[in-house]
Image (cartoon, helix red, strand yellow):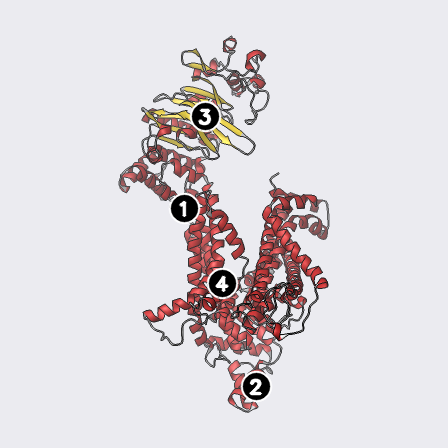
Amino acid sequence: MRNITVEFMLRQGTIKAVENVSLDIFKGEILGVVGESGSGKSTLASTILRMVSSPGRIKEGEIYFEGKELMKMPEDEFNQFRWSNIAMVFQAAQNALNPVLKIKDHFIETAKAHTRMSENDIIEKASKLLEYVRLQPKQVLDSYPHQLSGGMRQRVIIALSLILDPKILILDEPTTALDVITQAYIMDLLAKIHVDLGITMVFLTHDLSLIAKIADRVAVMYAGKIVEIGTVEEIFYGPLHPYTKGLVLAIPSLVDDITARRPIPGSPPNMLDLPSGCRFAPRCGYHMIEYCDGTVQAELIEAKPGHFTTCLEWERMME
Amino acid sequence: MWGEQKLIWYKRILVMLVTVLFAMTLTFILIRIMPGDPVDSMAMDMVRTQGMNYEEAYRQAKAILNYDPEVPIIVQYFSYVKQLARGSLGQSMIYKTSVVDIIGGSLPWTIFLLSISTLLAFLVGIIAGMYVAWKRKTILDPILSVYSSVMSSIPNYIVGLLLILVFSVWLKKLPSSGAYDTSVEPGFNWKFFGNVFKHSLMPIGAFFLTTVGNWALAMKGNAISVLGEDYVNAAKVRGLKQRRIILSYVGRNAILPLVTNLAITFGMMFGGSPLVENVFAYPGVGYFLNQSVGRRDFMLMQGMFLTITVAVVISNFIADILNSILDPRLR
Amino acid sequence: MRDFFAVICRNRRALWGMIILGIFLLMAVVGPLVVPLDTATSYANRYKLPSWEHPLGTDYAGRDTFQQFIHGSREVITVSFVTAIFTILFAFIVGTTAGIMGGKVDAIITFITDIMLTVPSFPVMMILSLAVRITDPISFGLVLSIWSWAGLARAIRSQILSLRKRDFIEASRVLGLKVTHIIFAEILPNITSYIAINFIMIMRNAITASVGLMVLGLVPFSSTHWGMMLQMAVGASGAMYGSSAIVYLLVPIVAITLFQMGCLFFASGLDEALNPRLRTQ
């Protein structure tokens, strides 16, 4: 993804939910995108599938996938492209099912919209997928969404996302609406899917600890921009951006001393009225007045091979 | 689970029966509290029109009306119920035929009028509502709004009057009264159907014009809220075609609450039928109810009132059934 | 109070509604005092077109339509008003009784209202018009309201039931406040907006029903009520068939339509104005 900017035109002003973001997603990896609500990560993900909801619109940027530029594809072609190459599981996906259709109808209609598979073939494949996510195909396929529990529906959605063997699976907070035990179960499942099927996954969440278990690389977003990208070890053990460091320090742990936890001071930025320099500056402990507040639009600096940050003070952070 | 369901249905049927019973009793009471003596007025009428002497007329009137003002009310009530059980609703004073016959002749016309109007308004309305909801900025939206505000403020019988003014008086193209011309023989032939069609155009028009806006607005509201639902978004991201989304996702979910409304509205229109039918002198149930009230024909009044109430009760019952069939969440 | 008007003015539709209703109200209250009613018939003058002397033309007997229209507005509004008051009164009494007393009383009342909701009200009104001699707005209002309160009573009952479960009612009870106090001080303010809107809508329905009864010829009410004007125009005097008579026919129709629209628009704004939770500040 290169130079993606998405804006929302509101009555009070224009919000750049995503500003000039560039990101690479490598085949076969699990990429975690971490950020608080409003950081722009969901919008970024929606952009990949051109699903940005109005009043938002993609102002500029390109996305390259297997040599094709996605933003330039005509709508019909792109509609076919959706789901068969890249699939996405939304936040609170339990409501993603049509209440008047049976589960099997969901599978059938999705497959029929993209392929010429016969109904029997579709049901066979769907059954296999449902078994894979540890559900009973016979029962589930003939049920209506309201007859299943939240966790079951989430698994159905995951199975549904795999029906066309997509190459990339984007998951937006797949476990937020569930209880902790189901959460662990689903994360386990997703890890298994990654290992067995080799699908590239992009994981969006605000919960850094969730990412720690499963991701290969992590990108951290703040106020519409990516502030750091690195491997999961680099991010956790050697963060090169004050925000990331703040997030890591704030994670409670069973073995640690709770008093060592530090919340990030200040409050989330007002997207209508952003500071002109570094957006994290008002809350930053490494803040240097000379250049952090200036009109410098932060670019990602490659501090170490593969480890990027927008903080100009990153060398200080390495100490 | 099944036992529970059956219980609910039995309760509903019970309520239905009690309502009908109540309607019967209500008409019984209403007529008894009328000022004046219905037997007397019928007898006087017979004296006038048939030249009977008063005693004979009074005796006959009592028999026809099945009403003897001297007998205690409870006894009257029971003879009334007995008569009903025999399947008779008495005889109309005005038309000199059995009330049951009049019902048989008029009910089909009212059902014809109401069902076509309601269905037409419903279909056109939901298509319009869907269109306006799907294509967010279209000129149809404000037009719909204005149309609906105005048309729902004009009582339907007045619209009927205006239609008569335009099409019968000025343009002289459509007949202003009756269900069909007396010169045409009723039968299963095109001539008859065509004639009936011509006569029904304006009454149906009056109903249609005043209700279509409301259906459209209701559908628009439902469709918009469905469009905001997650599953519509999820359908889009799965690459489903627009047509599929409109029909199976937005359409089916938005129509659901409206279909039961349809049955209920149908029943309510029965209640309003006297007005439009009167304007067009259309021989339906409402028309005869009106005639009976205006000319104090108590037997006919009872019968028509009962018919209308039973029609509403049945419509509500159908609405209940439809609701439980169509919404998988209720099964 | 100023708040209320501010909200209404912001909503253009509601503003128009209020203006229209205001004009009619003014017409009804002040009009008959200002405009005389000349009932002298003058056959030569029948169905004259609008002119300076007769702003809305004349009727089938040569009387001025404008005067009748103004005087009729008073009748129309009075009848609707009375109907609304009666309906709301009945509905309130029955609804709160059911809601507050609960148990057997509630069950019986619910049963009765169920039946009343099923049996259609217009036929009942038709039949009642035979039994009751309708000579003044009070009796008319009574007939119109007697079968119309069931729906509102149910709604009030359910509002009360849901309010009962809410905390502040419990708090009041714990504080030992009397039932009547609870009704008036706690419950009423919450259903005021609901009742106000219903008031307007009942007036709207009352006009349709009353005019309907008159057009059917069942209720020969005063001769200046718009419904009677309509009935005379259609039934008695061939207004449909003469060209200049069209004005006499259209005056009640347009008046009725405008009034109904005014009610509709105003009611839609009332909800927002009286229900502070709905306001998007």
Tell me how far mark 2 sits from mark 1, CA to CA: 64 Å
Label 4: how many residues lie within 10 Å, few (<14), some (14-19) or many (20+)? some
- Looking at the rendered structure, whether the residues under marks 1 and 4 are on a common chain is answered as no
The 10 Å Cα crowd at callout 3, few under 14, some 14 to 19, many 20 or more, is: many
Q: CA distance from mark 2 to mark 4?
A: 36 Å
Categorize mark 2 by other alpha carbons within 10 Å: few (<14), some (14-19), many (20+).
Answer: some
Q: Quadrant of residue B201?
A: bottom left
Asked whether the viewer can see residue B135, the reply is: yes
Circle 2 — which element? helix
Residue at the (59%, 48%) spot, across then down? C13
Q: Amino acid at mark 3?
A: Thr
Q: Chain of mark 1?
A: A
Give C40 or C96, whichever is nearer the viewer: C40
Instruction: Inspect the image, locate mark 2, and give the three-letter code of the amino acid beneath it.
Output: Met
What is the C-alpha distance between the residues marked 1 and 3? 37 Å
Q: Position of residue A50 (x, y in %)?
A: 40, 32
**Subunit bearing disc 3:** A
Q: Nearer the viewer, residue B179 or A311?
A: B179
Is A250 located above or below residue B280 in the figure? above
Q: Which mark is residue B269?
A: 4
Q: Can you identify the residue that label 1 sits on?
A: A100
Q: How far separated are the C-alphas under marks 1 and 4?
A: 30 Å
